Each structure stands twice: as C-alpha cells, then as structure tokens.
C-alpha cells in the first residue's frame, strides 16, 4: 500500500516538474527585479529557475523536519 502511494506521489511530482519546465522555457524575456536600493535586469528564465530551486529546497527542508518530528512521537 505504501509503495503505491509513493508511485502516485512520484508521478504527480514528475507532472508538476514537466509543467514547471514548460512554463520556464516559454518565459525567456528580460525583466527588471528591484531589491530596494538597486535593480537587476535578468532573463525571466533565470529568475524562474532560481525561484523553483528555492521552492524545492524549502519543501525538502519542511518535509525533512516534519519527518523528524513524526519519528520522535
């Protein structure tokens, strides 16, 4: 039962990854990003990839922390 749940989770993750890659590849125009005191002009593809990586890291750390808490109980 647990194996089937992992397979569904993997398939769902792969579909989301494919949608993210398609979205990133379609958005390559340069954009200006303001950090308050200065602005940087970068291609949107770089901004999206960096935000995607940050989101994955946050999810991974949050999931790892949740997993540790459930083992302690």
Image (cartoon, rainbow, N blue to C red):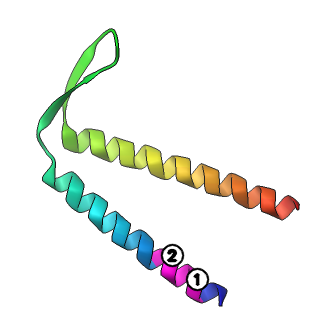
Cα–Cα span, label 2 and label 1: 6 Å
Q: Residue at x 77, y 57 (%)?
A: 68
x, y percent for residue 2: 65, 85
Q: Which residue is mark 1?
A: 5
**In the image, residue 24 above or below residue 33:** below
Q: Are marks 2 and 1 in contact (CB under 8 Å)?
A: yes
User: Badge 2 local density, few (<14 within 10 Å), some, or many (20+)?
Assistant: few
Residue range corresponding to the magenta coloring: 4-10
Q: Residue at x 71, y 56 (%)?
A: 66
**In the image, residue 68 above or below residue 37:** below
Q: Answer left or right for 33 relative to 29.
A: right
x, y percent for residue 46: 25, 41
Residue 9 numbered mark, or none: 2
Magenta run includes residue 9? yes
Q: Answer left or right for 11 relative to 48.
A: right
User: Badge 1 local density, few (<14 within 10 Å), some, or many (20+)?
Assistant: few
Q: Residue at x 72, y 61 (%)?
A: 67
Q: Quadrant of residue 32?
A: top left
Identify the secondary structure beneath mark 2. Answer: helix
């Amino acid at each position: 039962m647990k194996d089937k749940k992992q397979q569904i989770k993997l398939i769902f993750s792969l579909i989301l990854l494919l949608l993210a890659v398609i979205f990133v590849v379609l958005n390559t125009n340069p954009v200006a990003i303001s950090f308050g005191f200065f602005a940087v002009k970068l291609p949107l593809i770089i901004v999206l990839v960096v935000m995607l990586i940050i989101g994955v890291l946050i999810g991974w750390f949050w999931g790892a922390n949740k997993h540790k808490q459930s083992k302690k109980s």
